[in-house]
Amino acid sequence: MIKTIVIFGLLTVLLFTFDVLFGNGTFLFNQTDSFLIFQQFRLPRALSALAAGGMLSVSGLLMQNVFKNPLAGPDVLGISQGAALMVALTLLAGVGFGGIILAACLGAFFYLLLLVWASKYIKSSITLLLIGVMGGFIISAIISTLQVISQAEALKSYVIWSMGSFSKVEAIYAWIIFAFAPFILFFSMYFSKAFDTLLLGNQKAQLLGINSQKVFFIAIIITAIATGVSTAFCGPIAFVGLAAPHLCKWFLKTYKHQWLIPVSFFVGASMALLADILSGGIIGGFVLPLNATLSILAAPVIIYVIVKKTL
Amino acid sequence: MRYSLIFCSILIWLSCNSNNTHNSINLEALDWQEDSNSYASNFAIQRYTEHTRILVFKDKNRKDTLGKLYKGHFQNIPLDYVLLNGQKLACLSSVYAGFVDAINAAQQIGYVDETDFIYSKRLRSLIDSGKIKECGTESDLNFEVLAQQKPLVFTYEIDGQGNSVIERMKKLKIPFLICNDFRENHPLGRAEWLKVFGVICNQQHVAGQLFDEIVSHYESTLYFCQENIKTKPTVFSGAMFGGNWNVSGGNTFIAQFIKHAGGTYIFEDDNIDGNKLMTFENFYIRCKDADVWINPNHYHTLQEIKSEDNRYALFKAFKNKRVYNNNRLINQYGGNAYWEMGVVRPDIVLKDLLICMHPYFFENENPIFYKHLD
């Protein structure tokens, strides 16, 4: 297991270095202002891809565990949309960029609380997943309505934010996202054994002396912060939170969170870094939208999971 | 009896058939003359004895026809292509409303895509009195109203003729004209589309006169630039969108505007008719030392730009406070006069850009659409 963690850790470091050195289709040191380019463009991009990819992947892993559903993830369950709604309200109300972080975290948190409340009454994980998906649709509809009634200029700010991208993240914000990543990783690891018990079900967890409601709540707080912070600065990032944990489970073949969490973090980070490299003009100079690249990378994994589950 | 019935049927069929042949019009066989265009290449106005035909082409090669419209008296041509007298107009962009308004035919507009985007006082009063209504944008068009009222819809090409909106309008027999003005490379080429709107709105004389006036103003400004400007500032345009920069190519009308106003567009050698995506980093490398920055998205002040992304402040144009935006005239709903009138009045836009790039020539004069951000 440790070998797998080291391999994926090295892969992440390798992709991070490649993104910094060649991520824009040109070698960093061939630029005249190479230090400024490194400081203002390459490093923020790579840092935010690493941290947001990793955190979203851990969020997805915890969601799949909490809801006991392999198709759960921040964007599928509508958590990202919850964050987006609060960001839309903040931007359309004319509040500056500073308010977005808090708004995104609160949006993700309240939406998750709502889902947890629903989960008390709905036992079927598929039904809960569908409720989450439908909730995401309702929120998208509210955002669309807000866009219709808002002024053209306020709308532009939201539209710009809603395009998920790592290259729009400034250096200071990239460092903020990066600073959150070790905390998310540390707290997730700290509660990893407790998360294992959630897989056994509430009754068995209680027999083992674990307060499953408390663990549930911790998982939700971690997910809300990780999703909120990533979404606030990078905009909605598609599929990493859903696909990366599955790739990780596929490699590890274990349900122990002490292994799943770090590997999931590195797989998510690697996936985001790879998508950032591919979308940044390295293929024949073509710049591609980040979420389109991520969808191409992640969709086969998701199809594999669905087919495997059906068979 | 039976034979007489068969004989009568054959006679009726033959008579109907011969009538059809007699009435059908072979347009290609008739004599016609084409109005010569001075700058535009994507439309043609062809004059027949009793009617006029407007053709819209996909590009300047004029091989693919995007749309055609007939005006006059003739039969056996599908009704959706024939312009009726007094037919209302639906403009799916404020640009088209601007064209119609410029030739004093605003009362013919029945619908616009979004009333908030309309700036002109004349059009706003028609909106307030309920004479102009909203018909929705291309993604959410009110087909029911359009199918009932059958206005002539001015639209733009999104995904070519396969566009589902176009297909649906065809099925519902809603007359439409795909306007390909935005693919004209020369600013006066776009303005020349006034002639198309002139034919449609029976305002050909007004349209012709206005266009001549615009050309005269534009050329005199151009002459002024050629004669007086010795040092050309380097210029870039736009702002980041979703982490990337949508860069206008060297053949676009914005590139022409900059060149004509006595500037050097940073991407003038990029031989592209449309736009291309560029990462912020690559864009910065190309434009960091440019003298002037125009059209930075929707921002009104330098502080707004900086608060959106600190890296914008790295540009030399930002440091030297030489940033100009086209949002000086904005109504309470966010409608920008530039987008409605700028296309019709390139002479004003050119003068504005000249003032922005070379302010020392015009110390007591302010631009119309543009403002200096500080």
Image: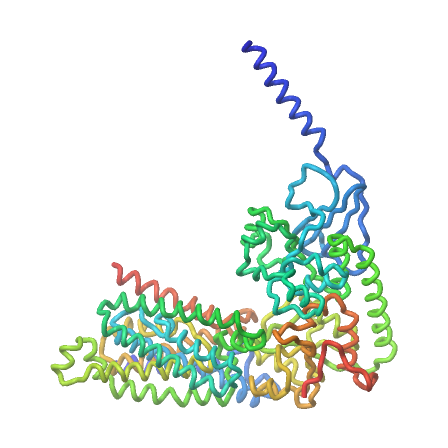
Q: Which color mode does the image show?
A: rainbow
From the viewer's perspective, is residue B47 above or below residue A83? Answer: above
Q: Quadrant of residue B303?
A: bottom right
Which quadrant is the N terminus of chain A positioned in?
Answer: bottom left
Q: Position of residue B132 (x, y in %)?
A: 64, 61
**In the depicted view, which residue is nearer to us: A258 or B235?**
B235
**In the depicted view, which residue is nearer to us: B194 or A151?**
A151
Q: Residue furthest left?
A: A207
Q: Residue furthest front?
A: B129
Q: Position of residue B38 (x, y in %)?
A: 81, 59
Q: Quadrant of residue A209?
A: bottom left
- Does the rendering let one see residue A54? no
Relative placement, left or right, of A124 versus B179 is: left
| Residue located 48% across and 77% down the image | A88
- Does the rendering let one see residue B195? yes
| Residue located 53% across and 87% down the image | A38
Relative placement, left or right, of B320 versus A87 is: right
Q: Position of residue B100 (x, y in %)?
A: 72, 60
| Residue located 78% across and 55% down the image | B203
What count of labels does the image hold?
0
Q: Residue furthest right?
A: B227
Q: Position of residue A128 (x, y in %)?
A: 28, 69
Which quadrant is the C terminus of chain A positioned in?
Answer: bottom left
Relative placement, left or right, of B175 versus A83 is: right
